[in-house]
Amino acid sequence: MKKLNTILCLLMGLGSFSCLLASSVQEQIEKETAKRDQSLKPLREAYEKSQRLVADGKSMEACGLLIKTFDGVPESLRSTPLATEVQKTLGTLEASLAGTASEQNHWPEARRRAIASLQYDPQNEKALSLLQKCDEVLRRGTIANEAVNPALTTKFFDRLNAVNTGLKEAQALRETGQLQKAEQRYEDVLEVDPFNQVATEGIKKIYEERALVAEKARDLSNLERKREVREAWNNIYPQSSASTGGVEISGAMTASPAYALEKRMQKTVIPQVDFSGADLETVRRALISLSRTYDPDPAKGGVNFVVSTDAVNPQPVTLKLRDTSLAEVVRYISQIAGVKARITDIGEEARTQFTNLYG
């Protein structure tokens, strides 16, 4: 009996010891879990903040924050679900930044970020594709066992971008006739790339275009002088006096019908003129009607307007005026249409004729 009691006591002691042991293990597990959670807290906070930064378009800042924080995580914790998710996110961010760098022709940076992406996520398809493309670009001109051409730096590609952008801008400026600005952009390109053939040819074309413009200007000036001489010979009415604004009559000359018509046009005030893209024939008919309506002479004879056959390709007339003399209206119309208004005598009658500005 005594022996049986001893055995029972021993069994009870072993049970109590097992309970104590289990409780101790549980406490140890809880302590380890709490310790691990505490160690991962900075990474969790960095991960949450990085997501907000990405949403705000600050992917590079988010990537830098995650890398810095992840590098401080102990190796024993890098297999945790949170650490695994962070590595996946880093792989995606690095691949995205690599793509942005490649679009800017920053191939060395793109290659570096593609490699970094694959270190975090070896199966990232975008990083794999970008790395292959980067190698194709950066291995041009390599020698021996070089992985990439050391001359193809980010600075080199920045200069290349500046050249390409400058050439496009200069071409656009030249095509729109802004030759001075176009020449300056070509000069900017040559400062970066002194032997650029496209820029050199562009400046050459600008010089050729300037020479052509100068030649046309000389021809135009000659035509204008010929026109002035012709008008001087054909002008049969007295010229307006600069000092009095009227007509200067010398000797036995008397005012011609053309002079009388000129004075009538100055006295005829048109309350409103409104042309919108009108052709010269429409303008002619309107002026005849307006001149008769507002002629201060009781007879309301108005002014007769004709369009000369040598008025070639006149411009459409868009004009709005109020309370303006007929003479001023005709002057504005002539300037807009690119023609010359001339008062001529036909026998005892005078008329206003629209003729070619340079004819």
Image: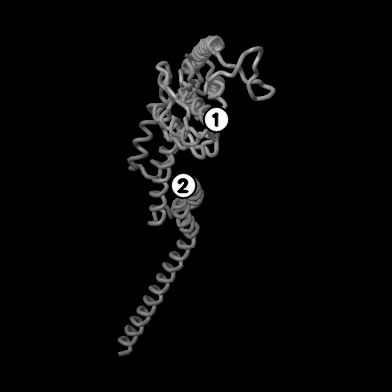
Quarter of the image where the N terminus is located: bottom left
> Residue at coordinates 44% horizontally, 52% vertically from top-left?
55
Callout 1 secondary element: helix
User: Outermost residue toward the bottom?
Assistant: 1
The residue beneath circle 2 is 59
Badge number at residue 328: 1
Instruction: Give the image location of residue 345, x and y in percent.
Output: 49, 17
Q: Is residue 268 left or right of residue 97?
A: right
* Amino acid, disc 2: Ser
Instruction: Give the image location of residue 8, x and y in percent.
Output: 32, 85
Callout 1: few (<14), some (14-19), or many (20+) C-alpha neighbours within 10 Å?
some
> Residue at coordinates 64% horizontally, 17% vertically from top-left?
249
Residue 287 occupies quadrant: top left
Residue 3 occupies quadrant: bottom left
Q: Nearer the viewer, residue 156 or 165?
A: 165
Instruction: Give the image location of residue 329, x and y in percent.
Output: 52, 31
Residue 21 occupies quadrant: bottom left
Callout 2 secondary element: helix
Is residue 219 at least partly visible in the picture?
A: yes
Badge number at residue 112: none
Going from the N terminus, do you reach mark 1 or mark 2 first?
Answer: 2
Asked if residue 49 is positioned above or below residue 277 in the image, the reply reads below
Q: Is residue 46 left or right of residue 241?
A: left
- Circle nearer the viewer, 1 or 2: 1
> Residue at coordinates 67% horizontally, 21% vertically from top-left?
242
Asked if residue 4 is positioned above or below residue 122 in the image, the reply reads below
Is residue 160 at least partly visible in the picture?
A: no
Q: Nearer the viewer, residue 158 or 121?
A: 158
